Every structure is written in C-alpha cells, then in structure tokens.
Amino acid sequence: MTGNNRMAAAALLASMLSALSLVPVISGGQWLSNAFVGLSLVALTGAGCRRARVVDSLIPFAQLLVLVAFLTAKFAAHDAVFGVVPGPAALETVGHVGRSGLDDIARFAAPVPPT
C-alpha cells in the first residue's frame, strides 16, 4: 500500500468514525449506511484514479462526480437520466431534500427523527 493510499484509508476511517458521533443526534440508522457507502465510493474513486495515474488535479473532480452520481441515485433516481446522471429535475429533487434537511435541523431537537 502506497503512502497516498494509506493516507486515504486513514481519512476514510477518520470520516467514518466522525460520522459515528452523530448517531445519538439522528434517529434511525439508514443515514449511517448511506454515509459509509458515499465515503467508501469517494475513497475508492481516489485510489482507483491514483492507480490509473490520473493527473492529481483531476482526482477531486472524479470523486465529486462519483459522489453526485451516488446522491442522485439515492435521492433522485426517478428524475435522473439512467438513474444516476442528474438533470434539472433531479437537481431540483436533491435541492428539495437538502432544504427539507435544513428545515428539520431548525425545527427539531436531538434526536432528530429520520425524514
């Protein structure tokens, strides 16, 4: 394992452990598995890009593309092209999900019910 991959694995572990600190704040566990899948996809994309010798400055864009595809598939698949490519309707749906989450944060006290 190269130094970059070790650092990516450590960052993935740190992010997952940090997400565990939110367990008492949010009811239900589905969000945690979604967070783990999203974090893993981003980390694996970075590792794959480094292995394929992609230019370093392009790796974050590849990771962002994979994360957007995952979020689209998870929250707006019915509005997306092929279920993962976000179009205007899918972006509107994801925006609505984000606004709904912010409204929940403003309205509820911990533990917040999943919505």
Image (cartoon, rainbow, N blue to C red):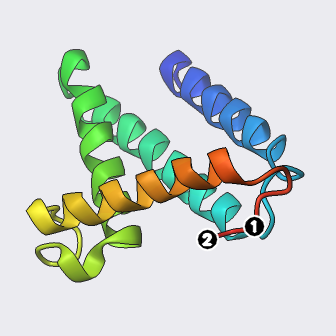
For numbered disc 1, what is the local secondary structure?
Answer: loop
Left or right side of 86 for 49: right
Residue toward you, 32 or 57: 32
The quadrant in which residue 51 appears is top left
Q: Residue at x 28, y 77 (%)?
A: 77
Residue at the right extreme of this rendering: 24
Question: Taking 103 as reference, is 56 above or below it?
Answer: above
Residue 98 appearing in the image: yes
Would you name the residue on which mark 2 appears?
115
Quadrant where the N terminus is found in the figure: top right
Residue toward you, 39 or 22: 22
Would you name the residue on which mark 1 appears?
113
The quadrant in which residue 44 appears is top left
Total marks in image: 2
Q: CA distance from mark 2 to mark 1?
A: 6 Å
Left or right side of 110 for 54: left
Residue at the front extreme of this rendering: 107
Question: Taking 20 as reference, is 46 above or below it?
Answer: above
Q: Position of residue 32 (x, y in %)?
A: 69, 59
Residue 40 appearing in the image: no
Q: Position of residue 106 (x, y in %)?
A: 64, 45
Residue toward you, 105 or 44: 105
Q: Position of residue 30 (x, y in %)?
A: 67, 70
Tag 1: amino acid: Pro
Q: Position of residue 9 (x, y in %)?
A: 61, 33
Quadrant where the C terminus is found in the figure: bottom right
Q: Residues within 10 Å of mark 1 (few under 14, many from 20)?
A: few
Tag 2: amino acid: Thr
